[in-house]
Image (cartoon, helix red, strand yellow):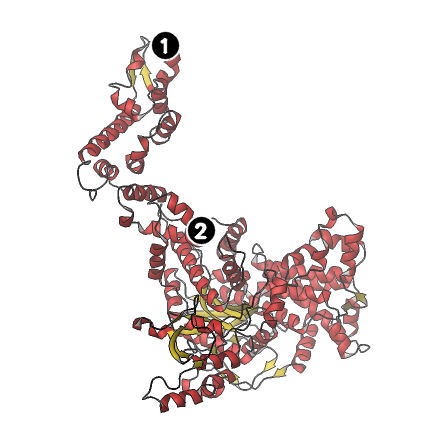
Amino acid sequence: MTDINDLSPFVDIISSLSGDAFYDFVKQFVGADEAEILKIQQIKNTRILLRVPDVFSFFAIKNSAINDLKERACFVNEDMQYVVKAGIQSNIDLFIDFLKKHQELKSSVQDKDDGKLDSANAVAQNVMPNESKSFAQIFIQNLLKNMKKSSNNYKFDDTINKFASALHLLAGHHAYEFIRINLSGALPSATTINKHNEYIDLRLRECEFRFDSLKNYLDSIDSNFVFSSEDSTGAIKSISYDSTDDCFIGFCSPLINGLPSMSKFKTENYYELEQWSKHVNRSSLVNAHLIEPIQTKASSQVHSRPYVLSAYGTDDKVTASDILRRWLHIYNQCKERDIHVVGFSSDCAPKYLKAMRLALRFFTRAPNIDLITGNEMHLNIDIPPTWSFFFMNNIQPFLCMQDGIHLITKIRNRLLSSTAKLCMNGHDIGVNYLLHILENYSKIEHNLVKTDVIPHDRQNYSSCVKITSDDVLNLLNQIDAKATYAYLYVLKLLILTYVKSNTSIKDRLLFGWTAVFFYRMWWSSLRVNHGLSSQDKDKAFITKSAFYSAEINIHCLTSIIILVSAGRLPPYSLNTYLFSSQACEATFRTARSLTGVFSSITNFSVNEFMNKIEKISILNHIKSSEESNDTTYSLKFPVHHKHRRNEATRSINSQDALPLTLDDIEKIVVTAYHDAELIMKDLKLTETMKKHKLNELNTLSSFVFTQLTKYSTIDYSAVSSIDDEDEDSDDDDSNNNDILTDCSENERESDEDSSENDNQGLYHLTVSKQTFHGMKIYDVINPAKANHYFKIFINDKPKYIHKQTAARMLSINKNSLSSDRQIRVQQTKIQN
């Protein structure tokens, strides 16, 4: 029989069961034979059962219908005398005794206060202590308690509050309320949920960097190694008032040392807000920083989720130096809290690529930047001096990786360029071969559609996977499109290296270096071709940013493998496909999905995004805490089948992978070089390389290194490895900061001169109407909320206008963004 304690939450339900439902319950909680004993006697509910003096007396009857059951439940001798088996006797007796005690206790407490324990708990405590309960038991027990109370006296277990909070976020308000009002007492109200969420305290203010909160989160999952990612998405240009911080959100905050200023747009003057609306840019993008924890314990079962470090509005008018200063601030603040930032990741935008090259000193000379001196936490990578193929310095403050999906789409998009004329040793590369396959072969042979070949959305990653499938590559071979085949085959290698989670560490290293050697051979063959102009050489190759990104990624991937093998990074770091900006992309998608069922709006302003970020943070907090809880009552969350595969792969990559020695890595790299040679052999490009004595690994690497050094840039930006002092940052302030001070200078002087008269210097507005229905404009306000209002004169009469109403009054156009991603990206740049 099931532990009698497990019956306590269902004791009030048992009495309502009858017939098959009652027998099924007995079968599940008491036993199959016991249920059949009751069923064959038509004892179909608890009321009948408690009236039967002896449920086993029917075995004395000689009847063939019960012989089989008698043999299973009793010991029978040759004279057909029987003795009920002790286990079955005990199970039924214990079950009947449980029901009798419940009935007796229920009768005795009918006239007593509701504050006493309900009968189910009393019986359970009398029979056996309650050591472990499932969530279903907690839920039903909590519901039964509340059913005896008035609605304003409902109490909820903390586990129920967590469940309700997660349900409210996942299902939306309308679905949650539908469940709550139809299951009275089962779930708390929205007000209670809000109080529960406030207790978790995961609110994120615009421009705030939550380093202390990050430290607490990392301590909870036992991790102090992280990888940081950064990305932005389009936002509606809209100004909103945040009453909690008494500031306006939606203006582009001025940058100080690359960092946005928090709560910069605070004012008690309507005129100042008007000047900001005229002269300060509004945020057309939301920028987010996420932290990917790197688990230090290989045996840990906790699924670490990216942590939202900061978010703020921007117009994307930042420089590579601003980005690098921002990264250094994150790096130094984490270092102060004993958090090791292994690296940074972003999309392949030119400014981020330049910031990475500056940080890594990768073919960019920056005389004024020194990130190593005085940094005791720098990464020392053991690079043998004989590795001519390795271009990166062996001492780095941190590593950098371009997002794999963005790199892949960037290389695919080169095929679609109207200016590029991709060519490899006289062989053209283009989408025409793919279009030929579409027109001349059945879809069952290639599984392509035209939008896979020429996608409307240039960031469509799934189309990259489809055009690099084995079926498509085989068809390209058949139609003798050798160069296009090689181009897409190498693109597939990059997908396996930086995106696919089930690629082994050795294969990542092999495929990544094969792709890089392929590009080096191709690039070198163009450099030595004197029949082409410099412009034609650039048109015949992938973009420089894609080339540099592929180089940086494979160097940093190799560095991570070396550091893990040397024990300087935890094995979890080998899951390099996590080191991308996809965590930011996923957060943006989640924020767009957090919309009510009766709304089709998928976009947000900066203020709306900050509110959604709080919800996402709470949901991630609940998921992480519950998944790390191994008790039976912990909440379970559905996991997509792709994520389940990722978890299994992550375990393989981080726990079962043997460390690679430097010799092992070198052998893999040499193999990758020969694999790249085989790809080029069909294009007869190896003959060109041999003609110019570039047909060996060392000579090719030396040539590429020399050429890239020749084309390296010089950047005279001054970036310190230590955060600049506040007094040193004044000169670096943006023009927006000048507007913040200058636009209201006259008004402030007027306020000072008229300090004896509060009504002087206030904003005067003349309108034709006298009443303002639907707008928060009042003659008298609550003094406790005076900071939420501007005092102005309307038609020479003093009025109080709510700051949110003021922000709407100063908005000329109502901006919106399309739900379609491609159109949304275009609209982001043209909002007024």
Cα separation between marks 1 and 2: 60 Å
The location of residue 222, given as percent across then percent down, is 38, 61
Could you tell which of marks 1 and 2 lies nearer the N-terminus? Answer: 1
Q: Nearer the viewer, residue 832 or 126?
A: 832
Secondary structure category for the residue under label 1: loop
Relative to 567, is 38 above or below?
Answer: above
- For this view, does 791 lie left or right of residue 401? left
The location of residue 289, given as percent across then percent down, is 48, 68
**Residue lying furthest bottom:** 753
Q: Nearer the viewer, residue 107 or 202?
A: 107
Residue in the image at 54% along x and 65% along y: 581
Question: Do labels 1 and 2 touch, CB within 8 Å?
Answer: no
Residue 3 shows in the view: no
Name the amino acid type tagged 1.
Asn
Label 1 or label 2, whichever lies nearer to me, is 2
Label 2, on which residue? 174
The location of residue 771, given as percent across then percent down, is 42, 70
The location of residue 436, given as percent across then percent down, is 80, 56
- For this view, does 437 lie left or right of residue 777? right
Label 1, on which residue? 63
Residue 14 shows in the view: yes
Q: Nearer the viewer, residue 483 or 59?
A: 59
User: Looking at the rendering, in which quadrant would you find the C terminus?
Assistant: bottom right
